[in-house]
Every structure is written in structure tokens, then in C-alpha cells.
């Protein structure tokens, strides 16, 4: 733990905490005003987790992906306990794929974001056919049918906010 913490600079750590807090608090606001379904529609937690994957080093982004749904569940009960493993795995894929594709596609945020979303859905679809009952094909289909507006909103708004946050941490990237 000391080795990882000694590598993370203060600004990056603060941004990770800020993005993690946004990933926890924004769904609370969505659920308060629109009920459970509005969170599934607009995917506010996914937005901030992917933003962490694009803007932060992989360790910090992974922390946001793992701890945001756990803290959200402890505070609000959402995501529900039965969905936690699937949500956490999907967020881990989102954040790691976003960072990887951002580098592979020469810092093209939009292409990295769409590729990360597709990677998460494809990997979860593959896992859904394993005999471990981790997720189901219907979950993946429903997540796209219900969350398409959130996915579209992410793809439209992600480049603008990501560019700003990337500038904040540009000199602190840990490879």
C-alpha cells in the first residue's frame, strides 16, 4: 500500500477522490429526483468512473471503479447487493479499457470512450455464457436498451470534461 500511495501525487489523489465522490453522489441526486430507473437510464456513476479511466493513472482509476459502487451501496443501497459483482466488474472494464484505448487511439477521447463501452458490453456478454451465473445476456441487453441515453450523453459530453481533467493531471501521469 505504501508503494502505491507514494507514487500517487496529491493532485491526482484529490481528483480521484473528487471523481469517486461525484460517482457516489450524482446517482443519489438522480435517484432522489427520478427514482431508481433514472439512474439506470443516465448512468451517472459510469460517467465519472470512465472519466477517471481517461484522465487518471490506472491505479487511481481502478480505485474509483471499485470503491464508488461499494460506497454508494453502503450509503443508499444502490446498486442492489445482487448486482454489485456485475456492476463492479463492468466499471473495472470501463475504466481500464478507457485508459488503454485512450493511449492506443492517440488520445482520441471519443474513440476511447465508445471502445470502452463496447469492450465492457462484449466482455460481460462473454461472461454471461459461462456457467458461473455472474451475469445474464438479458442484463447486457437491458443495460443497453435502458441506458442508451446515458451512453449517448457520455459520448457527447465526455470529451469536453475529460480534456479539462487531463490537463489538470498531465504532468502527473504514472504509467
Image (cartoon, rainbow, N blue to C red):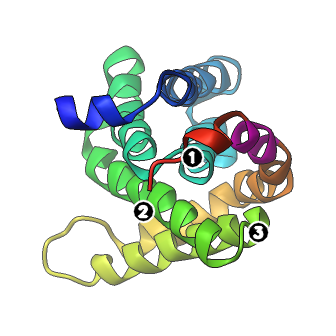
Q: Is residue 1 left or right of residue 58?
A: left
* Label at residue 46: 1
Quadrant in the picture for residue 4: top left
Q: Position of residue 123 (x, y in %)?
A: 40, 77
Front residue of this view, candidates 121 and 50:
50
- Res 124 visible: yes
Residue drawn at (49%, 55%) of the image: 95
| Label 1 secondary element | helix
Q: Is residue 138 left or right of residue 104?
A: left
Q: Position of residue 112 (x, y in %)?
A: 66, 69
- Res 79 visible: no
Q: Earlier in the sequence, mark 3 or mark 1?
A: 1
Q: In front of the other: label 2 or label 3?
A: 3
The residue beneath circle 3 is 108
| Label 2 secondary element | helix
Q: Is residue 169 magenta?
A: no
Q: Is residue 164 magenta?
A: yes
Amino acid at each position: 500500500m505504501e508503494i502505491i500511495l507514494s507514487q500517487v501525487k496529491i493532485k491526482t489523489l484529490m481528483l480521484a477522490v473528487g471523481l469517486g465522490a461525484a460517482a457516489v453522489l450524482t446517482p443519489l441526486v438522480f435517484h432522489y429526483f427520478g427514482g431508481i430507473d433514472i439512474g439506470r437510464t443516465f448512468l451517472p456513476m459510469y460517467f465519472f468512473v470512465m472519466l477517471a479511466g481517461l484522465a487518471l493513472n490506472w491505479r487511481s482509476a481502478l480505485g474509483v471503479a471499485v470503491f464508488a459502487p461499494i460506497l454508494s451501496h453502503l450509503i443508499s443501497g444502490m446498486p442492489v447487493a445482487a448486482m454489485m459483482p456485475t456492476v463492479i466488474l463492468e466499471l473495472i472494464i470501463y475504466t481500464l479499457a478507457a485508459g488503454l484505448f485512450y493511449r492506443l487511439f492517440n488520445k482520441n477521447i471519443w474513440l476511447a470512450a465508445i471502445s470502452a463501452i463496447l469492450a465492457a458490453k462484449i466482455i460481460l456478454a462473454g461472461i454471461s455464457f459461462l456457467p458461473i451465473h455472474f451475469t445474464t445476456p438479458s442484463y447486457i441487453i437491458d443495460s443497453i436498451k435502458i441506458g442508451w441515453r446515458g451512453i449517448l450523453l457520455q459520448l457527447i459530453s465526455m470529451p469536453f470534461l475529460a480534456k479539462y481533467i487531463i490537463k489538470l493531471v498531465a504532468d502527473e501521469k504514472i504509467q
